[in-house]
Amino acid sequence: MANQLTDQAAGLRDIQERRAVRVVAVTSGKGGVGKTSVSVNLAMSMGRSGRRVVLMDADLGLANVDVMLGLQPRYNITHVLQGTCALDDILIDAPHGVRVVPASSGTRQMAALTSAEHAGLIRAFSSLRQPVDALIVDVAAGISNSVLDMTQAAQEVVVVVCDEPASITDAYALIKVLSRDFGVTHFRVLANMVSSSLEGRELYNKIAKVTDRYLDVCLQYMGAVPYDEYLRKALQRQRAVVDIFPSSPSARAFKSLAAQADNWPVPRGARGRLEFFVERLIGAHRQPVGAIP
């Protein structure tokens, strides 16, 4: 057992020295804007480029990453919190080498976890043995405790919006709460289901105009994903559009977004708050056995 722990620690230190882990939280102010589709296709695009990707379904009570990919997990995050399984035990294989951390669906208890329980879930990443280049966290929509806790724990926050008044208003509300109450100051906005690149930029400008006036945040335009009939067909077939229709307009957009994300700077260490997914992934194994994190 001691040799096994030593080997794991050495492997994780090697990852840290060679390449830092990129942690991206994908969220939205309201549901129905295609947030999970963005998470799935971004993860698949990174996997296609050779990155070792873990896709975490952090919509804990209404999970659907597994449904979107046609997967049938035997265990999920609930079992990790109950102590039945380790995190590695619930990982399921998806196309292009992506590993999925499934959550439960229709479980009220999971949707109402406390901040302490969310922190316990994040701590579970200290036991992850899988080598990871990128962790994509599909966070729930809105401003629930789950959204706020998981979003704070990431390095990059991607806010998905579409051209609907409620989507824009709720995206601003999410950014306001995270910035004013939790000190998150950097956000990337992704315009989804737009008719043109111009519409995507205009959608971003609507949000940026208000945040520039009322909030002390840095807002960056990540890009846009066009409305695409092929994406709807991919969802019906429970496949990622980048996998089943790689030449479609939306698939090309996701590949471009993944290439862009791969060049984002990676912070070294946590900035405070709950931002320690990275530390749990590559740093916690340095502690002596039995140490309290």
Image (cartoon, rainbow, N blue to C red):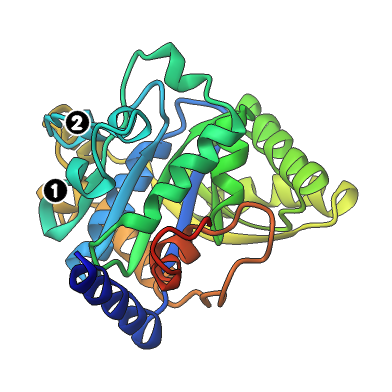
Tell me residue 244's x, y (percent): 10, 47
Tell me residue 200's x, y (percent): 54, 50
Question: Please, what secondary structure does the residue beneath circle 1 have?
Answer: loop
- Residue at (39% x, 48% y) in the render: 124
Judge depth for marks 2 and 1 and give the one in front. 2
Q: Is residue 235 above or below residue 62?
A: below
Q: Nearer the viewer, residue 242 or 268?
A: 268
Q: What residue did someone put label 1 on?
A: 94
Which mark identifies residue 196? none
- Residue at (34% x, 28% y) in the render: 82
Tell me residue 3's x, y (percent): 19, 73
Please indicate, yes or no, whether residue 29 appears anywhere in the rendered image.
Answer: no
- Residue at (25% x, 71% y) in the render: 8
Question: Please, what secondary structure does the residue beneath circle 2 have?
Answer: loop
Which mark identifies residue 75? 2
Q: How many marks?
A: 2
Q: Is residue 212 above or below residue 266?
A: above
Q: Amino acid at mark 2?
A: Tyr
- Asked which quadrant contains residue 51, the reply is bottom left
Structural crowding at the residue carrying mark 1, measured as other residues with C-alpha within 10 Å and reported as few (<14), some (14–19) or many (≥20)? some
Q: Is residue 276 above or below residue 101?
A: below
Structural crowding at the residue carrying mark 2, measured as other residues with C-alpha within 10 Å and reported as few (<14), some (14–19) or many (≥20)? some
- Residue at (26% x, 78% y) in the render: 11
N-terminal of the two: label 2 or label 1? 2
**Is 204 left or right of 223, judged from the image as shown?**
right
Please indicate, yes or no, whether residue 216 appears anywhere in the rendered image.
Answer: yes
**Is 98 left or right of 274, judged from the image as shown?**
left
Q: Amino acid at mark 1?
A: Ala
Tell me residue 265's x, y (percent): 53, 77
Q: Nearer the viewer, residue 105 or 126?
A: 126
Q: Quadrant of the N terminus?
A: bottom left
